[in-house]
Amino acid sequence: MSSEPLLEQLIDSLRCLPGVGPKSAQRMALHLLERDRDGGKTLSAVLAESMERIGRCRECRNLTEDETCSICANEQRDRDQLCIVESPSDVIAIEHATGFRGRYFVLMGRLSPLDGIGPEELGLEQLAEQLGQRPPQEMIIATNPTVEGEATAFYLQRMAQKHGISVSRIAHGVPLGGELEFTDQSTIAHAFSSRLAI
């Protein structure tokens, strides 16, 4: 048992969340203790159950409390389209923003040899097995436009080509409402080289 006071342990524990520094963690801890103990108890119970029961889908690696996630279990989803994303948050973003009705494969990261993240850590052996057993007609690569994301996209493209699968990459460019003078050079270059006829 820690000799550190329980309040300090609570504050330190909240700091594991992304973007939460010492002051934010302190503010959250004090809010729960001073104003919302019922909310804190609910948070504690749901968090404990989530840590215990939520795992990865056996097909797409998305987060789920079942063996197979609701997307993979849905027979209405199009098996001919497979979208490759870096994280479960990407699945949520695509589901909320588009009418995409295909399937997903969640990498849980991107290739980064310097950080020790290779094909094995991203489940690419599992993906290759799926592509060999039941290849989709189209693989949509939706990795982020970073150096690592582009390297991952290239690796995925080569995997798809081995199985004769058509490959597309989500477009990257100037955001809606953005102004060219405030957009970085690589984004402008990419947007310009990927321009479409209208």
Image: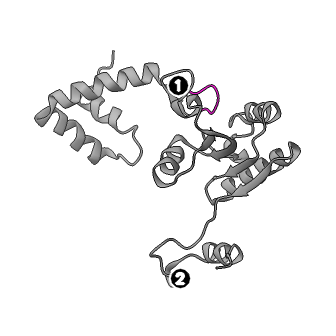
Q: Label 2's element?
A: helix
Residue sitting at the far bottom? 181
- What residue would you read off at disc 2? 180
| Residue 174 picture quarter | bottom right
User: Where residue 46 appears, x then y in whole percent?
Assistant: 32, 25
Q: How is the image coloured?
A: one colour
Identified at 53% across, 52% down, the residue is 99
| Direction from residue 30 to residue 87 in the image, left or right | right
Tell me which residue sits at (67%, 75%) in the image: 196
| Residue 147 inside the magenta-drawn segment | no
Mark before the other along the chain sequence, 2 or 1 = 1
Q: Which portion, as a residue range, is magenta?
A: 56-61
Say which residue appears at 51% left-offset and 84% top-offset: 181
Q: Main secondary structure of the magenta part?
A: loop
User: Quick check: 22 left or right of 115?
Assistant: left
User: Where does the image place residue 88, in percent across and percent down from the top left?
Assistant: 53, 40
Q: How many marks?
A: 2
Residue nearest the viewer, comparing 156 with 1: 156
Whether residues under marks 2 and 1 lie with C-beta atoms below 8 angstroms apart, the answer is no
User: What kind of residue is marked 2?
Assistant: Leu
**Residue 77 visible somewhere in the drawing:** yes
The residues bearing labels 2 and 1 have C-alpha atoms spaced at a distance of 42 Å
- Residue 137, percent from left and from top: 76, 46
| 122, above or below 42, in the image | below
Residue 22's spot in the image, x, y percent? 31, 45
Quadrant of the image containing the N terminus: top left
Q: Identify residue for label 1.
A: 55
